[in-house]
Image: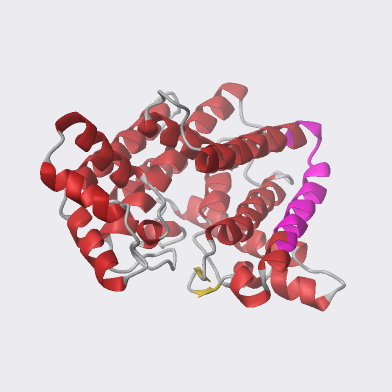
Amino acid sequence: MTVVGPFGLSVRGQALEADVQAGLAAVEEGLLEATKSEVPFITEAAQHLVKAGGKRFRPLLVMLAAQFGDPYAPGVVPSAVVVELTHLATLYHDDVMDEAAVRRGVASANTRWGNSVAVLTGDFLFARASQILADLGPEAVRVQALAFERLVTGQILETAGPQDGRDPVDHYLDVLGGKTGSLVAVSCRFGAMMSGADETVVDVLTQYGERLGVAFQLADDVLDIASDTHESGKTPGTDLREGIATLPVLRLRERVARLGLAEDVALCELLDSDLSDDARHAEALAALRAHPALEQARRDTVRYAEDARAALAPLEDCDAKAALIDLCDAVVHRAG
């Protein structure tokens, strides 16, 4: 078995391995072609994150889902390019909103060229994705539009915060379902749909993608606290420093509300303080790493990954299904 995907994933079967590798190579060519412009500066900015690399998690899911129909169908690779372009576009916008300095180990576009260029470059990528979608038919346009609405809604809900009386953890999981789960679900849906798979198979893979997407983001939440080096290129504790309450912090606050332990209250107060100070940030990071809230967040990650695995049960056993199951295991492994 050869590593062909994120997290060191290997696929079983030479035929599947060849199909996935060929598909991902074609996606890479498609991304470079889709980000070219007659204006050299636009090409440079649009290809900034493409050339920085990335896991290509979503295109991989398109390729694996396409195995349940005709993996060589003409719409498979373009649909994978669409989901990755959409994902990349959201990264440009996210970095502006988060005032991020680094993305995928390189300077973020907003750091290098300013917020206006970063936002407009994200818009350019959305436009290119839409052009490709137009050639895939009205159903593909509809599916992508609904997913994009969910993605934006998730971002707005995150910005607005939970309404009075709403459980913050439930609110956060809804945010992740929109921000991350929606596009991962569409990746699986496009792969199955474009390959001509049976509609029941399309639905199964879409449900799998939704749950895997949330597990994937929850694993990132855990990694942001627990890891010494972050595979996304971000510095550990970035979310803490920026005051973003991810699941470990929300689980801590939930514990404070339930038990009111003095040491938990003190940690919450530390997290709510100015963590731009390196010493205070290091103290908060070390305390949260040792706290039961982090282990609770790990268990939440495992639960969503197991739900994703369970969604695959109706599918017949094959190498592609085995690879999708292995992805569930890989997500859990990332979270420790």
- The image position of residue 178, as x and y in percent, is 54, 36
Q: Is residue 12 visible?
A: yes
**Residue at x 68% of width, y 32% of height:** 146
- Viewed as shown, does residue 182 lie left or right of 165? right
Decide whether the magenta segment is chiefly helix, strand or loop.
helix
- In magenta, the rendered stretch is 120-140
Q: Nearer the viewer, residue 308 or 195?
A: 308
Q: Is residue 107 above or below residue 183?
A: below
Quarter of the N terminus within the rendering: bottom left
Q: Nearer the viewer, residue 315 or 282?
A: 282
Is 126 contained in the magenta span?
Answer: yes
- Viewed as shown, does residue 146 lie left or right of 309? right
Colour scheme of the picture = secondary structure
Q: Is residue 264 above or below residue 119?
A: above
Q: Is residue 325 above or below residue 85?
A: above
- Residue lying at the far right in this picture: please name it: 38
